[in-house]
């Protein structure tokens, strides 16, 4: 093996190791970013991590989706498509649509909700 060949080979190995690492960290929610988006969109008006408010607690939502393969996609759909929801007082309104078109941010928020 020539010198350049060897170093190229090493670079490739390092690069793929890096990809693996970033892949692993992607599964974990970026809590700060998720919380910021949650606050900016005033989701907290109706959702609390532990307590049911106008809407179900994040724990309750996470529990309902536990073990569901499509959980993340379902939640993203819910917060991007809207639709009528029933509040705790029995009234109905259109669910809030998250104000970001950034799909990565949406997925991160969904993962954070599911991590409760
Ligand atoms: C006006 C009150 C209100 C606001 C604001 C609100 N939600 Fe909700 N949300 C609800 C209610 C009520 C439900 C329960 C719907 C049902 O079970 O029919 C719900 C359900 C959900 C669910 C569960 C969906 C499911 O399929 O079970 C998620 C996830 C969710 N909201 C995320 C969010 C996010 C993210 C935001 C901010 C962008 C937000 N909500 C803002 C009232 C609200």
Image (cartoon, rainbow, N blue to C red):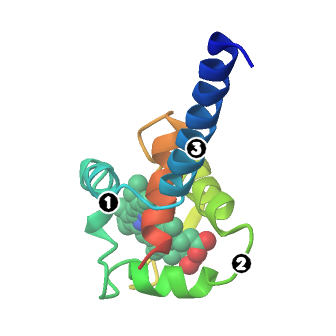
Give the foreground label among 2 and 1: 1
- Compared across the picture, whether 97 is left or right of 51 comes to right
Q: State which quadrant residue 46 falls in.
A: bottom left
Q: Element at badge 2?
A: loop
The span from disc 2 to disc 3 (Cα, nearest Å) is 30 Å
Residue 68 is left or right of residue 30, and the answer is right
- Using the numbered discs, state the Cα–Cα distance from disc 1 to disc 3 in whole angstroms: 25 Å
Residue position marked by numbered label 3 in the rendering = 17
The image shows residue 13 at horizontal and vertical percentages of 63, 36
Q: Quickly name the residue at label 2.
A: 68
Which x, y percent locates residue 40?
25, 47
Secondary structure beneath label 1? helix
- Specify which label sits upstream in the sequence, 2 or 3: 3
Reply above or below: 111 against 15: below
Q: Which residue is mark 1?
A: 31
Image height check: is 35 above or below 59?
above
Residue at screen point 61% across, 49% down: 81
């Amino acid at each position: 093996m020539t010198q350049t060949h060897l170093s190229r080979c090493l670079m490739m190995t390092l690069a793929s190791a890096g990809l693996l690492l970033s892949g692993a960290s992607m599964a974990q929610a970026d809590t700060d970013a998720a919380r910021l988006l949650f606050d900016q969109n005033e989701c907290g008006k109706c959702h609390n991590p532990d307590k049911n408010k106008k809407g179900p607690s994040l724990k309750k939502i996470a529990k309902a989706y536990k073990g569901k393969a499509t959980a993340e996609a379902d939640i993203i759909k819910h917060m991007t498509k809207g639709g009528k929801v029933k509040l705790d007082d029995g009234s109905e309104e259109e669910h809030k649509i998250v104000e970001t078109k950034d799909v990565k941010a949406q997925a991160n928020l969904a993962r954070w909700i599911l991590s409760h």
